[in-house]
Image (tube, grey):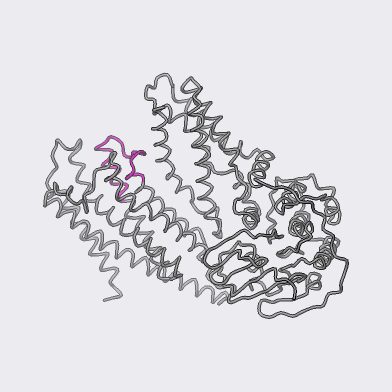
Amino acid sequence: MRRRAPEIFLGLGFAGIMTTLYLGLNWAPSVSIDAFESPAAQRIFYWHVPSAWAAFIAFGVLFFGSVLWFFKRSPLGWRLHVAGTEAGLACGLMAVWSGCVWGAAEWGTPWDWSDVRLNTFGLLTLLALFLVLGRQSQPDGVETRDTFSTFGLYGFVLVPLTYVATRIWQIRHPGPVIAAGDDGGSLQSSMALVLLIGALSFTVFIIGHMLISMRITHLEQRLEQAQKSLDGGN
Amino acid sequence: MAESMLSLVGLEVRRGMGVVLSDFNLEVASKDVVVLHGENGSGKSTVIESCARLLPLEKGSIQHHGALVVDAEGRRIIPTQPFGLTLQSNGLLGDETVENHLSTVCSLSGMKTDLLPMLESYGLAHRRHDRIGLLSGGQARKVAVLAGLLPAMLSSKPRLVFLDEPGTGLDKSALAALVSDIGQLREAGHAFVIASHHPELMKCATRLHDLKSESFQEQTPCQPWKANGVEEDARLLSTKVGHRYLRSTRAGLARNGLTALLVLGTLLAFVDPLSIENTALLVGFVFAAPFAAGLAGDPVVHLMRESRAVDWWRAHVNRIPNADFFAPVLGFIFTTLGCLLLLDAFNWKLSLIGAGILWATLTCVRFIELSTLRLARPNAVFIRLLLPILILPWALIVDFAATL
């Protein structure tokens, strides 16, 4: 059962995400036609917000893994770094893509280079892409791990910056939805419920994704060790 | 007891996934010639590169002349005394002339000298005005070896010299000159750490070290080397050398200047400035050229990727040669050009901001690029994926400049 945990998490998360999509597109109420240019496009938020939430969790894991590797030389830390990077890239791309779709419908432009929230989140996703592609281009070693962990450590500065961006410097991106404090009270309960299901589903999915990623990294390391033994090394 | 010039205490260094050096200790005193002759992969180059501050330490510390230069806490301090270094890769820039490179080495030691006698002894006198890129592999190696010896040759004070496989590629006469120079410099009080399997070089060792144990050898005394350097003021050396690289290669114009020109030309091909009333948009077009030129990166760093020249410089100074002088000048020129073509007026405030944009962008790109140098394949990483981080600050500056 424990060995199957990653697949179970992935399956449950996937089912939850499908449920969120169904509820978001068919069951959740429409928003006021006065408040939005394109009210129907707003339904993509049920995908956009939970995926951004999951991306933040993944970036948190990436940071934690980077700290563990950089300061403790922990192999588990490196596996967490790799898992966080890959999951962060997947969820980051989902959030960016869905945001662009909504932006094109609502603002008339998919991207705004002067909006802080858009740019910092986009950069986090680019950082994850850089780390994934960079890791694939280098032989595994302490030099590779140190360098990419450093980028993981510094890159995490963007996470709190992205989080507070719409609070202190709102240009285009709407204000906070999750953990909004007093401002979040206007959300209808049925909308909040769908968002909650979405956030939970993406969280479960991302945990499964990271567990599988860590298992793959572990197997890659064992394979490399075995190859070195065949080469006659230690 | 002779003065301790180099002290390696409890060194642990990792390369790849393996620990290359573990609890390694070494004390080198004046008049020591330590030849490291372990098997391939035993860590000879790792010792040399650690001593030159090029590798981070997992444990332990290294001192030059009793002062800490690198430790496991991440401290990396410029040695108080200059030292000689020849890396396994030559660390030479192909566009430099032999004489210019060796003069720079002298300046790094705060000295100058007549290089001709030394060039003659290595058979390089007739090649002194040639670019290093035109030399044969063996001749380039001679230049690299001579560059490693120079700090000791110039100074009457004892200096440390690190030579990694100095005998590789040298002909018989150059090897004889090297062995003779090592003997004379040793007699003058300088200390050597040499990684080599070459029998001739092993013969001139006072200590043979295989990284596990060491044995001692007696050397017959010879005539000590007579120092021939004169002190020289070498302030702003990195900026001066960077400027010289750019002047001799035109790399700044080819890389950054052309980028700016292409951006400006493309904009002019598609945009009629008279039809645009939005000032912010026009100012954005004006600043696009210096911004793009900055994104092209530091041309000096790009040049120095050749045969580990960046590493050779990083070992000696914390601030490597750069285009810090060239960047604002180019930024000023292209912003002025953009103002005249797109705004139909010269605005000195915009020109100064443009100069600042190019310099700041180029500095950020250099910082990001240098942070990946430790990787096994630094050119293979997609470092430019991180450059969009500069777009938002640029857009904010454009917004501000539009109000001027």
Q: Position of residue B211 (x, y in %)?
A: 66, 76
Farthest right residue?
A: B223
Q: Is residue B227 above or below residue B72?
A: above
Q: Is residue A107 above or below residue B278?
A: below
For the residue pair B88 and A220, the one nearer the viewer reads as: B88
What's the magenta bit mostly, secondary-structure-wise? helix
| Quadrant occupied by the N terminus of chain B | bottom right
Residue A133 in the figure: left or right of residue A60: right
The answer to if B238 sits in the magenta stretch is no
For the residue pair B2 and B403, the one nearer the viewer reads as: B2
Q: Is residue B17 above or below residue B317?
A: below
Magenta residue span? A94-119
Q: Position of residue B236 (x, y in %)?
A: 65, 45
Residue ID at (12%, 50%) = A27
| Quadrant occupied by the C terminus of chain B | top left
Task: Residue A110: name its quadrant.
Answer: top left
Q: Position of residue A93 (x, y in %)?
A: 34, 51
Q: Position of residue B255 (x, y in %)?
A: 58, 39
The answer to if A117 sits in the magenta stretch is yes
Task: Residue B141: name its quadrant.
Answer: bottom right
